[in-house]
Image: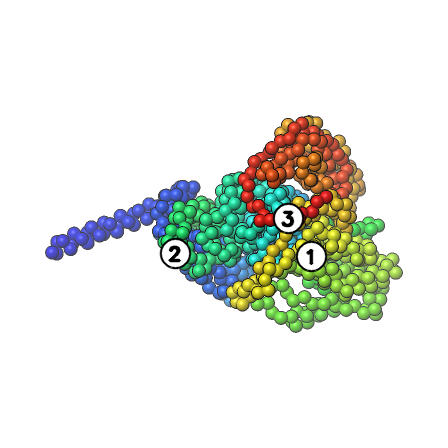
Amino acid sequence: MCQINTMKIIVMKKISLCTCFIVFALSVFAQANKLNTKQLVMQMTTEEKLKLVIGMGMNLPGLNNGPTVGAIKDRVPGAAGSTFPVKRLGIPSIILADGPAGLRIQPTRDNDKTKTFYCTAFPVGTLLASTWDVNLVKKVGQAMGSEVKAYGADVLLAPALNIHRNSLGGRNFEYYSEDPVVSGNMAAAMVNGIESNGVGTSIKHYAANNQETNRNYVNSIISERALREIYLRGFEIAVKKSQPWTVMSSYNKINGTYTSEDYSLLTTILREEWGFKGFVMTDWFGGKDAIAQMKAGNDLLMPGTDEQLNSLTAAVKNGQLDIKILDENCERILNIVLQSPAYKKYNYNNKPDLKANALIARSAAAEGMILLKNDNNTLPLVKGLKKIAAFGNTSYNFISGGTGSGDVNEAYTVSLVDGLKNAGYEIDAALKNSYEKFIAIEKEKAPKKKYFFELPAPFPEMDITKEVLAKKVEETDIAFITIGRNAGEFQDRKLENDYYLSEAEKGLIKNVSVAYHAQNKKVIAILNTGGVVDVSSWRNDVDAILLTWQGGQEAGNAVTDILSGKINPSGKLATTFPVSYSDEPSARSFPGKNLSDKPNMGMGGLVMGFDSESIYTEGIFVGYRYFNTFKIKPAYEFGYGLSYTNFEYSNLKLSASTFTGKTIVSVVVKNSGKVAGKEVVQLYITAPSQKLQKPALELKSFGKTALLQPGAMQTINFEINPKDIASFDTNASSWVAEAGKYIVKIGSSSEKILQTATFNLAKEMVVEKCNKVLSPQGKIDELIK
């Protein structure tokens, strides 16, 4: 009996040792064979697989403190979420963190004020797109990614590249442009820059997340052609040019199906047609049906809830979810996990080079600022200018970026007056003191934010009496007026006192301009906004307008670089400024209509929105495509921006007069002015429209010159490929280029075309056959030219 028991113990020990050896071997195998995840998935238990496809919960101040699934201590406090680790197989948890303008994490930890974890607030996406410089955006991405890695995160939830469908979009500041060619190429550059550090990205929000109103419940009804040409095209470009680690599905439905539950969107198009290799995650708490999400190819559910785990567990047990689908979801997640810094045991030090990155932020901000008006060479500021009067609350309280997941916890933000002072300009001290006291009092009165995504409470412009204004005119040489706007998640912007300036703001501009002009002194307006605002009602009052967007933490210094002439402005609009909001093609249908008067409630009693629908009746005529085609004069057109110098275009050449698969376009740009500068060169094409209606012109490529000295020239080259001249034919489910004459238009904006040439396509070309998917449920009464 004793001998038998001893034998049992020996056998059990051998089995235990064998099991340990297998686990150890599998861990080593995973380390050595990063791309071969099938065997690794085979060794996972069903429970481990189920937990891997569900995030570990959310642990953010003001929102559901404590993870809801498999609680672990945050490796990076303030990160948005993490994946489940399988330690016995050497699979670590990876950290996912916001956001598009820089890493968003907690700046302090455990009440320890001796250490800080600040990140660089880079310029917002709209400003970066306004640089029209993919090399610069890649450089910003490299700096951004270096901070992600230094602080121990693995995937940055960025970039965001949804289309500026409407000027009131609450998250437009995060997004690049109204045009998918700009959006896609900017996003690809950002992804390639960030991922050069060995960390990942998540391009978002896929797709048609073009409004915040009812974003979790809106059914976006869009034609197949508009989807393919406008709302999916930027994502297609980004995927093919950068192959991001992950894609984030959006909250909304498209034509009746939640995007995170749509197989045709996430698998048929994204993976099969475009060749995406990474994994798809939901936006936080996105979608409703976890089983449908797994089947659609939405691999990771974030941030993860007990309800989702229970639902999927039951579905596997009762056969509603095939284990083979779950295995595929796990494989795609593991393919990325095994590339992560966490898996490679990167020894992060929490010490990014914030000083170097601040310089990059400053440079990028200046490159994307746009000179909208400059009468009589008001700018750059004349030498010998002695004293400046800065009006407007925002002159002293600059907005570095929007709120919510697109925000950054930076150490500082340089205001306009800070930047001017840093450059040696004298600011009227009495006026500065009055504004700072007023702002401090208003901030103290404002209600405290409960959630990180809330907008700061707005407060009115400080009143400037006639007596004070008269005194400032006598004591100062020039006036600046800064108009500020902020926006963020959960709500779109309003027309009154947001898109349109308030009566107090318009009164300030009018009164200051009249007073200063009476003394032959200049007035300059600064627009520190994240999106489009009305300019038509007041732009004639001032001498110059500089659109600074939201330039990150170094914005004030970058603004001063432009104002002083240290840097020649070269930014161009990547979104149209209409004369009136009613001129926008989507104004009549944005943000749609509610289908119920019963609100949907979220955690913490938050009203999350109503069931609704938004019909994209403008079809493909978004932004400049509409304004140019229907001959609606904008206030400032797409591609517009002034410089302190002038440029001449000449010698436009095409490699062939007949298109046979590729055409090379070249044009010479000369700095014909008196100071050094850069120019953005835009290539548009007007296509034949016998079979399908087409916009008057469409952007197909762009380039930016180097810094050209006066008299210097540079040849800019473009390549036109078949997809560039094709339109999506819904009836044929194909990208088709019609036979006929194509006009190549080279210009400095969508309205200022400076050189043209033509080529012919002898016969119709079917460029790409696509799957018949994403059809709307009924006919859309789309705009027809």
Most extreme residue toward the left is: 1
Quadrant for the N terminus, please.
bottom left
Q: Amino acid at mark 2?
A: Ala
Give SS at disc 1.
Answer: loop
N-terminal-most mark, 2 or 1 = 2
Give SS at disc 3.
Answer: loop
**Residue found 64% across the figure and 38% down from its top:** 727
Give SS at disc 2.
Answer: helix
Most extreme residue toward the front is: 778
Give the label, 3 or 2, closer to the camera.
3
Q: Is residue 315 left or right of residue 434?
A: left
Q: Is residue 392 left or right of residue 620?
A: right
Q: Is residue 242 left or right of residue 592?
A: left
* Whole-percent x, y for residue 612 in the image: 60, 58
Residue position for label 1: 529
* Whole-percent x, y for residue 573 in the image: 71, 48
Cα–Cα span, label 2 and label 1: 49 Å
Cα–Cα span, label 3 and label 2: 40 Å
**Residue found 46% across the figure and 49% down from its top:** 295
Q: Amino acid at mark 1?
A: Thr
**Residue found 53% across the figure and 64% down from its top:** 602
* Whole-percent x, y for residue 329 in the image: 44, 48
Residue position for label 3: 780
N-terminal-most mark, 3 or 2 = 2
Give the label, 2 or 1, closer to the camera.
2
**Residue found 77% across the figure and 51% down from its top:** 635
